Image (tube, coloured by chain):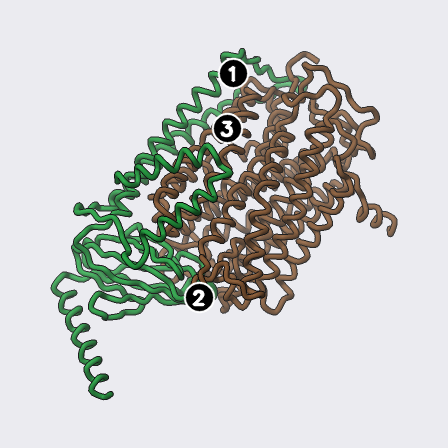
């Protein structure tokens, strides 16, 4: 958090003041970021606390919806009132907009600016707080590698077991997906867990989520990837802890056995 | 007949160039609209409905997006409306470079024709209007047609930019100061500043795609040291400002229509111009990362541009206050152009305010690339922009042709489309929250949103009938309309002081303006 704050403080005003320079600055900063965050070390920010991002997302969404509904209804009512109140009553009638004094004109510009900005910064702060929760990964977690391709999701577990279009995870343990892609850009979206991020060739991105209850969830591709984009679907299967452990060990054993057979055969 | 054709093809008159832009962009709109109907038909049931081949759907969607934005909205606003209105509004005889103007409309038609080749090519482009690599480079579709269409239309825009900035800066009628310009002229000025700065970036991006695909370079190929995200940065570095290239002129024409039919001054003119238009100019180039919230861009960039994106609400809010304030103590008559203009206020409210959650990066983690996005941008840009354009066409119809359209048919067509767009695009946002991603030919994993899709399809039919009636109305009025007179709306703006249609050279005598003249000088007892 401290790290990001510092980088923001350093980065944002510069970008605001010198819009023309934003692009090279962004590129340079991104190169630094890429070299530091991506392989071989794949550093990510870790966090011991496990937040509930689904509830967090739903809460922030509701708050923003109330916010924008109030603004929207206010503006709409004023507009409708004006439309009714000031309808033309005779063909020669003209408007009587009073001329604003300099003070009124400035007031009508400056006060709304501060009202809007206050709301913007409030929402930005709220959004940032939730953003940090999405980006900080819990320490205790199951790490699965994901490689996407046209049109499949390939998952690799820590013990080498691979699954296709089917992500099995245990209840109550955060899952981190480290994602890349073989061909084009895809986007791994789990709507029920309110989380997605693109997977792409040449970069490694990540998402994490916390499976809370056993059940099945849709995984779907959100980034256009050609012919069968809409059929690029998978399943997230959240299993009770014991069931998952049994499945995981069984698959691991099978893999070991297959490997051993291969070695003997050779 | 040949003489007339020759006159129109080789015209350098800004009014004829404007009308050529109008014809071309309405043609693009019609074809792209038919694509939308095909897509709505396809999506009316889960699974294949009218085509078994997802690539058909992808091509329709590609054409719909590319043609609506590049072939219809930008040319209709910065081609047709700017060409027709700006010289008239500033009291000039023509634009600064009339022959350059003719060249830009030719380039525009070449671009439209190239785009239409989509339907005769064996492997049409299917890269969506965004053309993201690596897909646009590995697809079997002919991405080159996408690149060349963008390049041609881009050149047309750059020429237009040079032309209009010069015209507005140097060719205003004697005595006309900057604070006496119509809001539409101001917004055109701002839009062309954006075009001049940002179009070259888009040109670069699509050229790089072409080099990669056909000449073997590796700009976007990570296995040879390229980077797939560079394109998205370049693309949105132009294409987000492009949203304002559309937004500014359309809100500008709405201001002019509202002032005319409310017979009222613009509320707090300087706030609208310097706060609203100026603020958007200032922020336009610093928000593009909000299209890349879920691409793994560095956190400080995503959070930083979340703040700048939210701040866009400030200038837009000021323009809203100016727009609604213009109604205050007005004398509002509800003609067809006014209905379109007023509806833009409501469409922009829904579209603009649903942009606020989308500006928040952490909200985007869920809704990005979902149906919520097309719902939102259709409201804010596509539908609001199209309604403003249609309002503008109705508004200028008596000026362009000297004839009056049918108010009855105009209002009927307005209400059909207005109901239609809400029936299509509100459920679209709801489907997005249910998890439905955009650009899907089939949605078997989200079968529960089938009902919403069927509602949308019904709405699409309303829109189609509504727009068709508008076209019928114009064609009918062109041949059988009543004479309209020079100033049927009682406007104070310069374009209404000349004949309808204006003669070559626009004004019998170039107007000379006093320092207290204003295009919005209503209620002065004159």
Q: CA distance from mark 3 to mark 1?
A: 15 Å
Residue A121: which quarter of the image? top left
Placement of A208 over or under A3, stated as above or below: below
Residue B421 image point, x, y percent: 51, 44
- The circle on residue A253 is none
Chain B palette colour: brown
- Residue A71 picture quarter: top left
Q: Write the residue at 49% across / 16% down.
A: A106
Are the residues under marks 1 and 2 on the same chain?
yes
Give the colour of chain A: green
Residue placed under numbered mark 1 in the picture: A105
Q: Residues within 10 Å of mark 3 (few under 14, many from 20)?
A: many
Q: Which mark is residue A228?
A: 2
Tell me the quarter of the picture where residue A260 sits. Answer: bottom left
Q: Secondary structure at mark 3?
A: helix
Q: Residue at 17% x, 47% y: name it.
A: A48
Q: Which badge, 1 or 2, is on the more N-terminal residue?
A: 1
- Chain name for mark 1: A
Q: Is residue B477 above or below residue A170?
A: above
């Amino acid at each position: 958090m401290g790290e990001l704050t510092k980088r923001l403080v350093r980065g944002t005003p510069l970008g605001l003041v010198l819009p023309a320079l934003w692009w090279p600055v962004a590129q340079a900063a991104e190169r630094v970021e890429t070299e530091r965050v991506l392989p071989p070390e794949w550093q990510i920010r870790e966090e011991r606390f496990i937040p509930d991002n689904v509830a967090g997302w739903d809460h922030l969404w509701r708050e923003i919806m109330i916010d924008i509904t109030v603004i929207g209804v206010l503006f709409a009512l004023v507009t409708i009132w004006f439309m009714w109140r000031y309808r033309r009553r005779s063909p020669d009638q003209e408007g009587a907009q009073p001329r604003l004094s300099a003070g009124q004109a400035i007031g009508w510009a400056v006060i709304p600016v501060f009202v809007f900005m206050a709301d913007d910064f409030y929402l930005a702060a709220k959004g940032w707080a939730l953003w940090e929760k999405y980006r900080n990964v819990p320490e205790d977690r199951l790490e699965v590698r994901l490689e996407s391709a046209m049109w499949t999701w390939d998952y690799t577990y820590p013990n080498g077991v691979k699954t296709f279009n089917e992500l099995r995870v245990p209840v109550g343990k955060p899952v981190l997906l480290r994602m890349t892609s073989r061909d084009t850009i895809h986007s791994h979206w789990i709507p029920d867990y309110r989380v997605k991020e693109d997977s792409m060739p040449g970069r490694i991105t990540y998402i994490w989520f916390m499976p809370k209850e056993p059940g099945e969830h849709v995984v779907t591709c959100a980034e256009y990837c050609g012919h069968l984009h809409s059929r690029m679907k998978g399943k997230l299967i959240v299993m009770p802890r014991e069931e998952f452990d049994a499945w995981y060990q069984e698959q691991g054993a099978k893999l070991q056995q297959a490997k051993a057979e291969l070695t003997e055969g050779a | 007949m040949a003489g007339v054709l020759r006159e129109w093809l080789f015209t350098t008159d800004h009014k004829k160039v404007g009308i050529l832009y109008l014809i071309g962009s309405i043609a693009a709109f019609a074809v792209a609209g038919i694509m939308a109907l095909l897509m709505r038909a396809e999506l009316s049931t889960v699974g294949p409905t009218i085509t078994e081949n997802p690539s058909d759907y992808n091509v329709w969607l590609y054409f719909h997006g590319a043609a609506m934005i590049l072939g219809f909205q930008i040319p209709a606003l910065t081609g047709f409306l700017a060409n027709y209105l700006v010289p008239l509004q500033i009291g000039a005889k023509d634009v600064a470079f009339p022959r350059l103007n003719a060249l830009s409309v030719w380039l525009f038609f070449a671009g439209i024709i190239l785009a239409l080749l989509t339907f005769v090519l064996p492997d049409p482009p299917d890269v969506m209007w965004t053309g993201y690599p690596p897909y646009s480079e590995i697809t079997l579709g002919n991405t080159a047609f996408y690149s060349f269409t963008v390049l041609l239309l881009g050149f047309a825009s750059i020429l237009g930019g040079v032309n209009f900035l010069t015209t507005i800066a140097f060719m205003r009628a004697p005595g006309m100061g900057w604070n006496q310009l119509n809001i539409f002229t101001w917004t055109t000025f701002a839009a062309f500043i954006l075009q001049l700065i940002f179009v070259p970036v888009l040109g670069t991006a699509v050229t790089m795609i072409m080099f990669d695909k056909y000449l073997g370079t590796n700009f976007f190929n990570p296995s040879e040291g390229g980077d797939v995200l560079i394109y998205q940065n370049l693309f949105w570095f132009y294409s987000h400002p492009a949203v304002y290239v559309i937004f500014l002129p359309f809100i500008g024409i709405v201001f002019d229509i509202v002032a005319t039919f409310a017979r009222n001054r613009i509320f707090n003119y300087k706030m609208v111009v310097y706060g609203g238009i100026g603020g958007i100019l200032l922020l336009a180039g610093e928000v593009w990362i909000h299209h890349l919230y879920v691409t793994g861009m560095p956190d400080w960039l995503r959070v930083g541009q979340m703040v700048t994106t939210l701040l866009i609400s400030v200038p837009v809010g000021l323009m809203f206050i100016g727009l609604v304030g213009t109604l205050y103590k007005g004398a509002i008559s509800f003609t067809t152009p006014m209905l379109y203009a007023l509806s833009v206020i409501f469409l922009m409210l829904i579209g603009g305010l649903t942009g606020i959650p989308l500006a928040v990066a952490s909200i985007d983690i869920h809704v990005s690339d979902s149906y919520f996005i097309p719902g939102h941008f259709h409201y804010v840009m596509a539908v609001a922009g199209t309604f403003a354009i249609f309002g503008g066409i109705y508004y200028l119809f008596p000026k362009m042709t000297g004839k009056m359209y049918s108010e009855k048919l105009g209002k009927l067509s307005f209400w059909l489309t207005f109901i239609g767009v809400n029936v299509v695009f509100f459920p679209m946002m709801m489907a997005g929250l249910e998890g439905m991603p955009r650009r899907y030919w089939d949605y078997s994993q989200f079968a529960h949103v089938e009902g919403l899709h069927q509602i949308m399809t019904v709405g699409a039919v309303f829109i189609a009938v509504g727009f068709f009636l508008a076209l019928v109305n114009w064609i009918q009025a062109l041949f059988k309309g009543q004479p309209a007179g020079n100033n049927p709306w009682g406007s104070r703006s310069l374009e209404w002081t000349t004949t309808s249609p204006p003669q070559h050279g626009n004004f019998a005598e170039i107007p000379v303006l006093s320092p207290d003249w204003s295009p919005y000088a209503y209620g002065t007892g004159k």
